[in-house]
Image: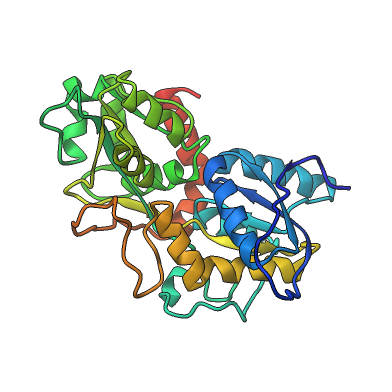
Amino acid sequence: MRLPLLSLAITALATGAIAQSGPLVIYTSTPTDQMDELVARFNESYPDIQVEYFRSGTTEVMNRLEAEFVAGDPQPDVLLIADTVVMEGLKAEDRLMAFAEADTTDTDADLHDADGYYFSTKLITTGFAYNTELVSEPASSWAELTDPAIASRLTMASPQYSGAAMIHVGTVAETGGFGWEYFETLAENGAIAGRGNGGVLSAVANGEVDYGIIIDFMPLNAAAEGSPIGFVFPDEGVTAVTEPVAILATARNVEAAQAFVNWQLSEEGQRFHVEQGYLPLRDGIDRPATFPDVEIDIIQVDPAILLEQSEDIKRRFADLFGG
């Protein structure tokens, strides 16, 4: 029996016979407004698929899903969340269904699971935002954020709630020149942590803080809409997640789930992600107009290391910042 979910009944404008149909349940960390838009666009191509979704931060999504695993009644057909670390864990537990026939045309094979259990859909980097009405000369590096004058007016998302934050904290903690000492210094100098990236965006835009460590598209989209917020790709590089999509081994509607995965990777789906402000994965598609024309350097750590350390990352971060 399915639990009540936020349901979207979309009246499709598309025409033509589509084989895939029926209910499709998605668990996701995608912001609600963007998920609503995504479902509406997907239904233009697949009008006979009725999408229902549950949305929260990656950690809360997984807490709910783990409880369903224990109860023997997992609800989702598809999982669309922030990071590959969680997907690696689910793959190791035989919770995912391989989709070897997924259409990954014009995307980097290294961005997807080699065995076809999950697929990256976009690139989301983490840098930092600042309030343009409060900060005239913004910092340009991660190192500068530890300055007491900046750290005392800085907030960030917590890995207890956000998958992107978990990747960011774990990656920085494993990177030479930073380590856990970096976060210890931030905490000592007054930095605070909330829950998700949405709260960080609001705090910076409203002037509650000067700076916020945050994923890229939120402040860039807000700035394009006139919000007093800027975004910095730090000199040392940015961390990144790829919001992978996967089909659960217990999926009830496999055909619809496969259609959803392929649509995410298709040219149509990738262009839609750009419209929402995300960096695309597919070759030949330009980055969003909201992104500055700068080279983006990505700091990476083996996802297997982050998977092994994920609980320790959350614990150590909570010890420093609460939560």
Q: Is residue 213 left or right of residue 9?
A: left
Residue 305 locus on image (x, y percent): 45, 56
How is the rendered protein coloured? rainbow
Res. 97 in view: no
Residue located 62% across and 38% down the image: 60
Residue lying farthest left?
A: 137
Q: In front here: 304 or 138? A: 138
Instruction: Compare residues 176 and 244 and report the one nearer the observer.
Output: 244
Total marks in image = 0
Front-most of residues 118 and 169:
118
Q: At 42% from the left edge and 73% from the top edge, which residue is drawn?
A: 110
Q: Is residue 68 left or right of residue 159?
A: right
Above/below status of 272 relative to 171: below
Q: Where residue 136 sits in the image (x, y, percent)?
A: 12, 28
Name the spot of residue 170 as percent of width and height, x first. Answer: 40, 46
Image location of residue 217, percent across then percent down? 37, 46
Please say whether residue 290 is visible from this viewpoint: yes
Q: Is residue 163 above or below residue 83?
A: above
Q: Quadrant of residue 219?
A: top left
Residue under the point 44% across and 46% down: 164
With respect to residue 258, does 299 lie above or below? above
**Residue located farthest toward the right when viewing the structure as drawn:** 1
Which residue corresponds to the image point at 59% horizontal and 71% vertical from the top-left? 262
Q: Is residue 208 above or below residue 305?
A: above
